[in-house]
Amino acid sequence: MSLRRKSVITLIHKIASNIAIAANVVGTFVVVALIAVVNYDIIARGIFNKPFLGAVEVVQFSMVLIVFLQLPDVVRVGRLTRSDGFLGLVKQRSPGVGRRMSQILDLISGVFMVIIAVAFWPEFLEMWESQDYFGVPGVFTAPWWPVKLVIFLSASLCAVHFALHVLTGGEAPRKQESGT
């Protein structure tokens, strides 16, 4: 690999890693906010008989945000759940073959992430223009577009990280630890 190509890959890796770490941190804050909402709902419901209207919608909204905000960092550090017992065995017996198989899996995973991103972009645009919402009108509503945007951006960033794994043989991006 040429020095220029390595430096470009290193720069892309650094930028993508910083974004993934930041998204992971935001996802962690969403978890904390979700805990606060659930606790508030429990206390308000139990003590004052005044539940937090929209708690169910906030939980649904938050769960999607948490998963897709934290997913790129999970991909970045190579901790995405998969059954890789066979791959581990191959890597022990033949590291080169194991690395190539891992690159093929990362390539396939990256393609799936691109498909998800391409599928969600028009949905985001539609939700942005229509201002479609979920929830119960008059009680609690929230727009759908932020969820669609987060899914699109997350899938795109995951695709970048999978591409980096393929280009580097999976070594450089996976050596770093998670930011949180």
Image (spheres, rainbow, N blue to C red):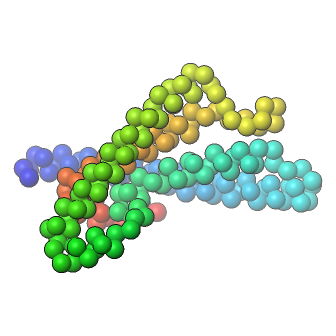
Residue in the foreground of this view, choosing between 55 and 48: 55
Taking depth in this image into account, of 23 and 70 the one nearest to the observer is 70
Q: Position of residue 85 (x, y in %)?
A: 34, 74
Q: With 138 as the anchor, is 147 left or right in this view?
A: left
Q: Who's the residue at 86% across and 55% down the image?
A: 44
Residue 66 appears anywhere in the view: yes
Image x and y of residue 66, in percent: 55, 52
Could you tell whether 10 is left or right of 113 in the image? left
Q: Hey, which residue is sitting farthest left in the picture?
A: 2
> Measured along the vertical axis of the image, is residue 143 above or below residue 160?
above
Q: Residue at x 41, y 44 (%)?
A: 155
- Left or right of 159 in this view: 139: right
Observer-nearest of 76 and 12: 76
In the foreground, 180 or 147: 147
Q: Residue furthest front?
A: 86
* Res. 21 visible in picture: no
